[in-house]
Amino acid sequence: MLSGLPPESGATSLRVAVDGPELPGAPGTTGPQVLADAVAERLPTLSRPAVVVPAEGFYRPASLRLEHGRTDPDARYSDWLDAAALAREVLDRCGPRGTGEHLPALWDLERDRAARAEYRPAPAGGVLLVPGSLLQGLGLAFDVVVHLRVSPAARRRRAPADRAWELPAFDRYDDEVDPMALADAVVLADHADRPALVLQGRWS
């Protein structure tokens, strides 16, 4: 479906969010990063170039993310992603009147320092995929949103013990944003080995 959607008039690329929790599961489990990588690999075979820019490359420094501790679900919900930087360095640049370049990452999470990455040309007429969690409701200029829906019960079943503290952030996201209702396509991913696709929004 993405292969047939052109970018917005004046934009370099079609900007696509792949939104959902990253949870462990069986090999090949569908998470935002896995799905975005698979789509980016498939699109060139359909004559559509693609690039993946993970949202976690635009997380804030640890001093800001973890200001209230390492296990604060409210901070996980609102303080981790630097949405303004993601917009400024990626989405706006690839949109109408943008430069046509994007920054692949702003912050190196592993080293907790600036990534020092250089701007790269976005795929002209192609697809820019941004995988990550909690991406909707922030006013980010995505042309298409794909949401991986994992129910609260499935999240609790699949979340490892050391990440259970994050679960209230995703509950809040469901309650306050209702990401499933806002998305153009929903991947029902309670059963990681049997995802199902629901089309809505621009495809309804």
Image (tube, rainbow, N blue to C red):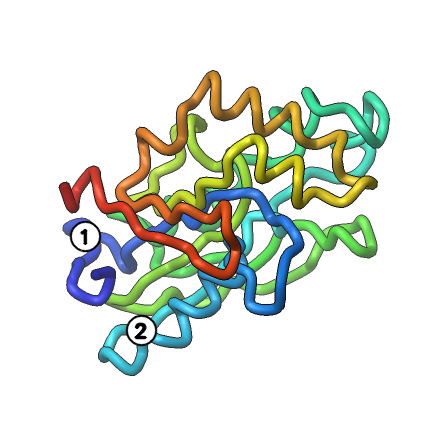
Please name which of the two marks, 1 or 2, marks the residue nearer to the observer: 2
SS at badge 1:
loop
Is the C terminus in the top left, top right, bottom left or bottom right quadrant? top left
Q: Position of residue 203 (x, y in %)?
A: 16, 46
Left or right position of 156 against 120: right
Query: Above or below — where is 130 with respect to 77?
Result: below
What amino acid is found at the position of numbered circle 2 in the picture?
Answer: Leu
**Label 2, residues with CA under 10 Å away: few <14, some 14-19, many ≥20:** some
Q: Position of residue 31 (x, y in %)?
A: 53, 54
Front residue of this view, candidates 60 and 92: 60
Front residue of this view, candidates 142 and 122: 142
Front residue of this view, candidates 195 and 38: 195
Q: Position of residue 135 (x, y in %)?
A: 48, 37
What amino acid is found at the position of numbered circle 1 in the picture?
Answer: Gly
Mark sitting on residue 10: 1
Which image quadrant for residue 80? Answer: top right
Residue under the point 45% across and 50% down: 90
Proximity of marks 1 and 2: CB atoms separated by less than 8 Å: no
Q: CA distance from mark 1 to mark 2?
A: 21 Å
Query: Above or below — where is 43 with respect to 186?
Result: below
Query: Above or below — where is 63 with respect to 6?
Result: above
Mark sitting on residue 148: none
Q: Position of residue 116 (x, y in %)?
A: 68, 59
SS at badge 2:
helix
Label 2: which residue?
A: 43
Which image quadrant for residue 126? Answer: bottom left
Left or right position of 177 against 98: right
How many badges with numbers are in the image? Answer: 2
Q: Report the residue that reaches farthest toward the top.
A: 176
